[in-house]
Amino acid sequence: MKIYSDGSSLSEIENLINELNIDGFTTNPSLMKKLGVKDYVGYCKEFISLINGRPVSFEVFANDLDEMKRQAKIINNWGTNVYIKVPITNTLGESCLPLVKDLQESGIKVNITAVFTKDQIDDIFDTLVDEIPSIVSIFAGRIADTGVSPITNVKYAVQRFRNNDKVEVLWASCREIYNIHQAEKSGCHIITIQNSLLKKMNLKGKDLNQFSIETVKMFREDAVQSGYKL
């Protein structure tokens, strides 16, 4: 399973590639806003120049399909490693799949994002062009936020696209390192992880007794440094 970084800053990219051997990158307007990005185009182009041809997904942010298409064509011209992130619907709940089909018929790679339901997965299955690479991003973390296990829907997507090697199913909105195990067990091709969690990847397999002691030490040191008294 490939590990992608979600919402990286430019200053983090070199370390992610050299130290963690990250396979690719994703981002979205919300994550870029948090990073303080002002120049969308300039930032994305500099991003591409740093990732040595690894796949990256940049999102359109219009609400009208015609304007989404215009934006998608601009983004597509930035590099052959670029996927266009297209939401499954616009803010009015209108399907964006006609645009996805249009883009794919033009040879454009897409990453269909904000996918939550089996019905949406079925609709995507009926839309994708077999010869063009695409990513289906299941928002597993947000599904789990509702108290529902996302694994059923992730497995359903993997099974649905099992005969199309151009489609990759991605576990999105990762919440914890354990999600990597869940995604891998579900048959996902990709999981995208924010950098705050990537830093915890070296904890995999850590002795829990030792981890317990280290946690108690942390609480003790913080209490001492804070000067608390009873």
Image (tube, rainbow, N blue to C red):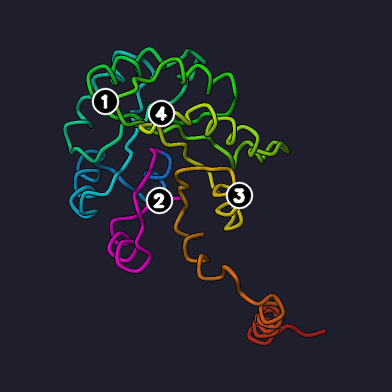
Residue 69 versus residue 209: which sits nearer the camera? 209
Asked which quadrant contains residue 140, the reply is top right
* Relative height, residue 20 to residue 92 (above, below): below
Task: Tell me the amino acid under the disc marked 4.
Answer: Asn
User: Mark 4 or 1 closer to N-term?
Assistant: 1
Q: Examine the rendering and report whether any part of residue 31 can be seen.
A: yes
Q: Name the residue under label 1.
A: 72
Picture coordinates of residue 211 (x, y %)?
Answer: 66, 77
Residues at badges 1 and 3 in contact (C-beta under 8 Å)?
no
Q: Residues within 10 Å of mark 3 (few under 14, many from 20)?
A: some
Query: Mark 3 or mark 4, which is nearer to you?
Result: 4
Q: Does the magenta stretch include residue 210?
A: no
Picture coordinates of residue 126 (x, y %)?
Answer: 45, 15
| Label 3 – label 2 distance at C-alpha | 16 Å
| Label 2 – label 4 distance at C-alpha | 21 Å
Q: What element carries label 4?
A: loop
* On-image quarter of the C terminus: bottom right
Residue 39 versus residue 131: which sits nearer the camera? 131
Q: What element carries label 3?
A: helix
Q: What stretch is highlighted in magenta?
A: 1-29
User: Mark 2 or 4 closer to N-term?
Assistant: 2
Using residue 75 as the reference point, say whether residue 170 is left or right of it.
right
Task: Tell me the amino acid under the disc marked 1.
Answer: Ala
Q: Mark 4 points at which residue?
A: 164
Q: Mark 3 points at which residue?
A: 182
Going 69% across and 75% down the picture, which residue do you hit? Answer: 208
User: Mark 1 or 3 closer to N-term?
Assistant: 1
- Point out which mark residue 4 bears: 2
User: Mark 3 or 2 closer to N-term?
Assistant: 2
